[in-house]
Image (cartoon, grey):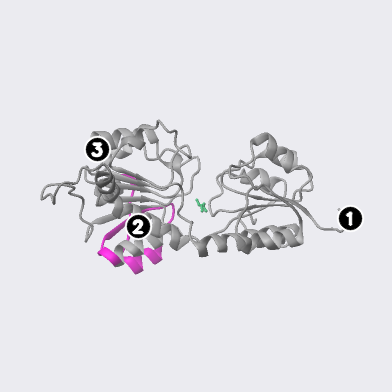
Amino acid sequence: MADGKPRVFVTREIPAAGLDRVRQECHAEVWSEPLPPPREVLLQKVRGCDGVLALLTDKVDAELMDAAGPQLKVISNFAVGYNNIDIPEATKRGIRVGNTPDVLTDATADMAFSLLISAARRVVEGQDYIRAGKWKTWEPLGHIGQDLCERTLGIVGMGRIGMAMARRCRGGWNMRVLYHNRSRKEQAEQELGARRVELDELLAESDFVSVHADLNDTTRGMFNAAAFRKMKKTAVFVNTARGPLHVQSDLYTALKNGDIFAAGLDVTDPEPPAQDDPLLTLPNCVIAPHIGSATVSSRNGMAEIAADNLLLGLQGKPLRCWVNRQ
Ligand code: DGY
């Protein structure tokens, strides 16, 4: 461009806290439709761009990088997770990739916490019961849920969000904390008395299993029929990370057969689930539409970091949150 401003494509409207600066400092085309750009459109829109600000719904792979062209310097993901991006491919091409950690940690842990308690205490099922006109009187034997105090919490993926969830459950309900993680987390052990265990032990011992792991080839489908069978029949499964960490048909069967008590999901596979997905018929499954980070400060913070990452990458500078820093 004659004025020297870089060209970028922003794949959806994000909060003005970040978008305004991108618009000021770049020739920015912003996809303003409510649904993501279709693949063919995305490939066409990125052509000739120096930077792309992407969402977790956009697949950023070699084909997209080829479509953009060799001038592409930076991909800034408006998310902490980046399983939508082929990181090795970006790295091979010298394309910087940024993400938005920290600012959504508390909001996402709050979501996991609310799904846990909603599923354990059958809150949504109760609301549906009232709305269906079925509530006739106070029922001594009705709507019995699970206790929370001093139970055992199993965290799978003890990163920032897993730690924040564990703090809530330990501080609020004095839960015993088990965790399964690639590496030892001394802070969790010292601060919360958490114990690192193998997955099988965690599944067998936990009353609540909350997943906060990255989605990758090792973790994809780790919550399958075999895993659900290892859990307590009274257990509650919570997934606020990525839908493909669980096998949705196996989760349905486990909930339907009473292999586990309930589930609270902020993520599904696929997203959104098909309208005829049998999971949607189950009273013991609470589902939210991937809104863990949907608070004002989290989304504004994500927009600020995503804009910083994009603008820094365009200048060839270190990103504020740099996924593929070598
Ligand atoms: C993320 O950031 O990865 C969440 O899933 C959406 O905020």
State yes or no: residue 196 in magenta: yes
Q: Residues within 10 Å of mark 3 (few under 14, many from 20)?
A: some
**Which residues make up the magenta segment?**
172-200
Looking at the image, is 10 positioned above or below residue 20?
A: above
Label 2 residue SS: helix
Q: CA distance from mark 3 to mark 1?
A: 64 Å
Q: Are marks 3 and 1 in contact (CB under 8 Å)?
A: no
Residue carrying label 1: 2
- Residue 259, numbered circle: 3
Image quarter (top left, top right, bottom left or bottom right) of the C terminus? bottom right
- Residue 23, numbered circle: none
**Residue type at numbered disc 3:** Asp
Q: Residue at x 59, y 56 (%)?
A: 99
Q: Position of residue 151 (x, y in %)?
A: 23, 57
Q: Earlier in the sequence, mark 3 or mark 2?
A: 2
Q: Earlier in the sequence, mark 3 or mark 1?
A: 1
Residue farthest to the right, as pictured: 2
Residue farthest to the top, as pictured: 276
Q: Residue at x 31, y 61 (%)?
A: 169
Q: Residues within 10 Å of mark 2 (few under 14, many from 20)?
A: many
Q: Residue at x 53, y 51 (%)?
A: 81
Q: Nearer the viewer, mark 3 or mark 2?
A: 2
